[in-house]
Amino acid sequence: QQQQQQQQNFKIQLQEHEQENDAFKVLSGTISLFCEEWNLNYLKVSTLDNDESEIGQKGESDLYKNHYRKERMCPGSWDKVVHYLSPKDMIKELFHSNVDFERTRSSKLEMCTNNLEESLSLKRHKAIKSNSNSNNSSCQLSFHKATKKNEKVQTMLSLFQSIQKYSVKTSHTLFFNQLFGTSDPIALAAEIIALSVNTSAYTYETAPVFTMLEREVIERLGRLVFEGCFEDDEENVELLESNKNDFLGHSECVNQNQNIIDDAKYDGLMLAGGSLSNLTALHIARFHCLQRQDYEKYQVEEISTTYKDNEPELMEKIINLSSSNTQEKVQSSCTLYGEAGFLEEKKEEGYLVDILDSSRHNYSRNQGKDEEQSTLISQPAIHQKRSNGVHKLVAFVSSEAHYSFRKSMAVTGLGMNNLISVPTLSDGSMDVHELEILMKKTFYLGYLPFFVTATAGSTVRGSFDNIAAIKNVCLNVEKEILKHPHSHLPSISANYKIWIHVDGAWGGSVIFSRRKEIRELISGLEKADSFTFNPHKMLGAPQQTTAFVTQHKGILKMANSTGAKYLFDPRKNGAEYDLGDGSYTCGRKTDAVKLWAMWKYYGSEGLGKIVESKVDDLAIFAKRIQDSESFMLACTPWQFNINFFYLPKRIRNLLKEHGISTSEHNPVLPDEISNQLAQVSVQLKLLLHESGSMLIPYQPISNQKADCFRIVLAGNKKLSSDSIEWILFLMDKYGSDL
């Protein structure tokens, strides 16, 4: 019996060993798939497949074939951006319940996938019976039932390859759909190393190397952002000293031998995306405001949302705060023409804007009714209400700012209604004159401005707000509030300060550029309280890589710490370097290694040249758009975003009838043409998507009533002259008859 038991135990151990071996075979094969996807064996260049011959048969010129050949030889490039399947077809092809397929015994992985009919679904599958004499075998793939022993490796690798095949090739040269793209190979290598270690960057004890890397990266970033300090080498230090006025900061670079981690001046974290970074900025700004104001003063029972009409002096101040010389601006409530004339609101304004616009009417209507109160704000949903005990704080963003700020106001309990959207100028940048008026008006209505966001590269336009001008406005408002305290507010401390956050999720990578005209986009950045940028966007780090940095050392831990003793114990080795208690989250990815690796490999100057090359390539693209009669710029381009319309022949004829030139930078289009252009944009995008040729977004833009196309160079991507011609050719090929 003992011998039988030993044999049984040995058999079990052998099965477990075989299963473990199979799992590692899957891992090894998956690494091969990764290499194949990235074409890491691309030095062995194969000839083009049938796709090129099909192109040649259609009579396109050698220019397009040359473009096609170049792109196919590059890592991460394919014949199509996506093998398009509709949701219904996706379910039918990849997530079906019944399977019946011929299992290939070939050792070649691609042979196993060509006839793939396995399902990706986790449902229990009922296999279709096959003839016993045939070579077919049924496969039962189920979440509850393990894959058959002799099929485990090939089945899983086949399924993984199917996932690759039908996923969007975001590294394709013609993928423009989002603000990310081809991963930088150095950052990707760092990501692979981080995955191999599989740790969490919350304590030094668990992740000593990654903790110190993150602290180093954040401090270097803080000195670059808030001091304009390039630390590549002695030559760059001398350059900074000789050209102080051309750069952000005027402070000297630190000694290279200085212990930058122990002598840190800044605070920050790597976070999971720009939205979470903006939420963090809003959260710590509120903490900072209440801390400086003495939080105990704000423990009120209920915040009043009304004003009494027996305060004529207050209302007179509001009425007199009118703009006599308002600069040209574009209201974000512009009607958008969608498909089939569908009307939709472009952006929702903060509710207080309507209140401010109607303040004169409310006062005159109710004047003389001492006992009556006029409700200023309605709160229709619980997520729009302020939490009890928090002062009536209001935040300000431009109408071009990211939508995450509205969500952040809801999450923090400040209320979406207390986010005020400031109109923009014709170029999409914040109208700082209007900002000052709105901030003063809200104060006189009993609200306390505490937070302003300056956008450094908006999503659609790529516009940059004037940070220095916003800072000056905030200083003026702070003086006004301290000079004229309001009866609706508790006494305001002399420490009162408005927090300025710069959202550079898209355009923040300009911090690495030395070129004067590019650095001018973020002039005044050193005066901000916090800054965020996403290296996974313009620089091509793998998703998600986001850095948040603030001038207020130690504020993240003060605002977020709960002192969980089981994890954050000062008696542990290196506890003083722990990062996790300064974050909302417990587990944290080791994202800093990706930015560290790129910075280490390319240096600040190299990263700056990456940014500058994108500016140059897009300038050429914009000029090509302007010179072509089949295209028209939708607005004057900023450096990193080109917005344009495709013009079928019938639209071009309409423009000629109205005397509108296709070479205009900022065209004013009649409603008739806008309505038809909107439909063209939607239809052309769908055709390009379904063909798999190109993924390019159409988006609303504040100065036009029709959606326009947008080209950006996100990720590790350049735009050659051949690529430009290929883009224009494809759009004309699929759109000429629309």
Image (spheres, helix red, strand yellow):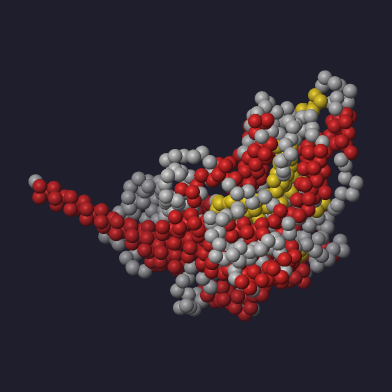
Q: Nearer the viewer, residue 677 or 480?
A: 480
Q: Nearer the viewer, residue 399 or 294?
A: 294
> Which residue is at 37% across, 60% downward?
27
> Which residue is at 40% across, 62% downward?
30
Q: Do we see residue 380 in this rendering?
A: no
Looking at the image, which residue sits at the far top?
A: 371
Q: Nearer the viewer, residue 133 or 564?
A: 564
The image position of residue 598, as x and y in percent, is 54, 65
Q: In screen coordinates, is 212 left or right of 456? A: left
Can you say whether 607 is above or below 336 in the image? below
The image position of residue 545, as x and y in percent, is 55, 56
Looking at the image, which residue sits at the far bottom?
A: 62
Quadrant of the frame with the C terminus = bottom right
The image position of residue 405, as x and y in percent, is 66, 45
Looking at the image, which residue sits at the far right?
A: 324
The image position of residue 641, as x and y in percent, is 70, 62
> Which residue is at 29% across, 56% downward?
20
Quadrant in the rendering for residue 44: bottom left
Q: Nearer the viewer, residue 452 or 401?
A: 452
The image shows a total of numbered marks equal to: 0
Can you say whether 402 is above or below 237 in the image? above
Q: Do we see residue 224 in this rendering?
A: yes
> Which residue is at 88% across, 26% downward?
367
